[in-house]
Image: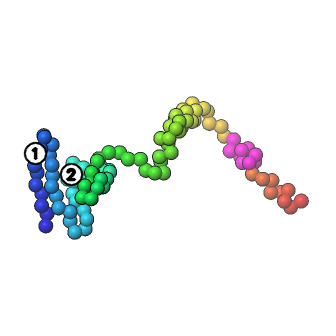
């Protein structure tokens, strides 16, 4: 059974909904496809905020000077002529396999 009531309070719309048997509620098409943060503030009190959220595995980008360092690296890569020296770099970093057999 779905129950919805809209009440006006201080020029804000308050929507009252019933949580379905599967534990879900619909926030409406206005929020379709958006990320929301759900915080349980206390027993029976839930706060829902829409926004853009940073995944844990990307959080390091926003710590310290990491964004500045990354921006500098991208600018360097864009402004520096590419060198075709892959083979010489490989020879410098790979161990000499021939010496194992001598």
- Residue at the right extreme, as displayed: 102
Near-viewer residue (17 or 93) = 17
Near-viewer residue (55 or 14) = 14
Q: Residue at the spot x=53%, y=36% of the render?
A: 65
Is 26 located above or below residue 58 in the figure? below
Tag 2: Cα neighbours inside 10 Å, few (<14), some, or many (≥20)? few
Q: How far across and how far down the image is residue 26, in percent?
A: 21, 57
Residue 61 lies in the magenta stretch: no
* Quadrant, the C terminus: bottom right
Q: How far across and how far down the image is residue 75, in percent?
A: 54, 32
Res. 8 mark: 1
Q: Residue at the spot x=55%, y=33% of the render?
A: 72
Is 63 located above or below residue 3 in the figure? above
Q: Residue at the spot x=10%, y=49% of the render?
A: 7
Residue 37 horizontal side relative to residue 66, left or right: left
Is tag 2's residue or tag 1's residue first in the polypeptide sequence?
A: 1
Tag 1: Cα neighbours inside 10 Å, few (<14), some, or many (≥20)? few
Residue 34 horizontal side relative to residue 26, left or right: right
Cα separation, mark 2 vs mark 1, equals 20 Å
Q: Between label 2 and label 1, give the one nearer the viewer.
A: 1
The residue indicated by pointer 2 is: 29
- Residue at the front extreme, as displayed: 43
Residue 91 lies in the magenta stretch: yes
**Magenta part of the chain:** 85-93
Q: How far across and how far down the image is residue 96, in percent?
A: 80, 53
């Amino acid at each position: 059974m779905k129950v919805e009531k809209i009440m006006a309070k201080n020029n804000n719309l308050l929507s009252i909904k019933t949580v379905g048997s599967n534990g879900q509620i619909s926030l409406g098409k206005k929020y379709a496809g958006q990320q929301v943060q759900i915080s349980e503030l206390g027993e029976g009190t839930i706060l829902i905020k829409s926004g853009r959220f940073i995944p844990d595995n990307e959080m390091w980008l926003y710590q310290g000077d990491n964004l500045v360092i990354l921006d500098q690296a991208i600018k360097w890569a864009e402004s520096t002529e590419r060198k075709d020296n892959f083979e010489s770099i490989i020879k410098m970093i790979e161990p000499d396999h021939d010496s194992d057999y001598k």
